[in-house]
Image (cartoon, rainbow, N blue to C red):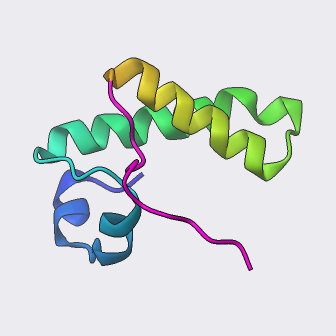
Amino acid sequence: MKPPRLIQAGDGSIGERIFVKEAQVENKVQQIAYHELTQAFVAYLRLPAWLNEGLARLTVDRFTGHPMVREDIEISIN
């Protein structure tokens, strides 16, 4: 997990198209921690990648009280 200073310095252009923008870096670090800890706790289950990511994102949504992924975007699968 990156420290807050590296998160702030990183290029977030791709993430801005998908994820809800978090104003405070402390909140973003907290979201990343929830996400990564969830993945660590369920690693022994050997879940498919899509389910592993889904559970981690759901956990972040539940703990923060708001969605992590923007709802106003359209995703097309070709």
Q: Front-most of 18 and 45?
A: 18
Instruction: State how many labels appear.
Output: 0
Q: Residue at x 70, y 72 (%)?
A: 77
Which quadrant of the view contains residue 30? top left
In the rendered image, which quarter contains the C terminus? bottom right
Give the image quarter of residue 26: top left
Residue 64 picture location, percent across and down: 33, 24
Foreground pick, 64 / 33: 64
**Image vertical order of residue 62 relative to residue 55, above or below:** above
Q: Residue at x 50, y 38 (%)?
A: 35
Q: Which residues are magenta?
A: 66-78
Question: Is 75 contained in the magenta span?
Answer: yes
Q: Residue at x 25, y 61 (%)?
A: 7
- Above or below, 9 against 49 in this view is below
Left or right of residue 3, residue 70 in this image: right
Residue 37 highlighted magenta (yes or no)? no
- Image location of residue 2, percent across then percent down: 35, 56
Q: Residue 31 at x, y = what percent? A: 36, 37
Q: Position of residue 53 (x, y in %)?
A: 65, 45
Residue at 62% from the left image edge and 71% from the top image edge: 76
Magenta residues: mostly which secondary structure?
Answer: loop
Q: Height in image: 48 above or below 39?
A: below
Q: Is residue 55 left or right of residue 10?
A: right
> Foreground residue, 18 or 46?
18
